[in-house]
Amino acid sequence: MPSIFTRIINGDIPCYKVAENEHCFAFLDISPLTKGHTLVVPKKEIDYLFDLDSETYLELMSFSKKLARAIDQAVPCLRVGVAVIGLEVPHAHIHLIPLQNGSINFSDPKLKLEKEEFERIASAIRLAYN
């Protein structure tokens, strides 16, 4: 059965997409730690980041770097943090999280944003990405 991320990439589950290329897909986390918290996934469904072939891995990192710069422009923050945990969903993914205080704590309360706020943030990141 396809992972939830594959279903999002395929359009079976809606998302707030911020960027896409031939190999990668990025969308806002719907339970964000901060405004602009983005998930970056390879389109190829591989469970573990370090099991990706070298080409896909390098593409994912390059895509994430460009996207982090866009998030940094679109969302007020000190910098964009990176986390790879990879246990919640069996599909390799990177968290790009705008930081206000320099730390990432996944046990912090998640934000509850309205649809319009998600759409505004996604649009701002898309504009900065292009």
Image (cartoon, rainbow, N blue to C red):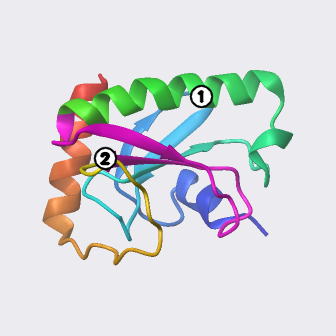
Q: Position of residue 120 (x, y in %)?
A: 15, 51
Image quarter in which the C terminus is found: top left
Check disc 2 and report its element: helix, strand or loop. Answer: strand
Q: Residue 19 or 36: which is nearer the viewer?
A: 36
Look at 35% across and 65% down and name the residue there: 32
Total count of labels: 2
Q: Position of residue 1 (x, y in %)?
A: 79, 70
Q: Quadrant of residue 81?
A: top left
Disc 2 vs disc 1: which is toward the camera? 2
Look at 27% across and 51% down and name the residue there: 101
Which stretch is magenta? Answer: 74-98
Q: Position of residue 92 (x, y in %)?
A: 69, 50
Disc number placed over residue 61 in the picture, else none: 1
- Type of amino acid at the residue the image marks with label 2: Pro
Residue 84 within the magenta-colored segment of the rendering: yes
User: Is residue 22 among what the camera can see?
Assistant: no
Q: Which residue carries the number 2 mark?
A: 98
- Type of amino acid at the residue the image marks with label 1: Met
Q: As drawn, is 100 to the left or to the right of 88?
A: left
Q: As drawn, is 85 to the left or to the right of 110?
A: right
Look at 76% across and 21% down and name the residue there: 55
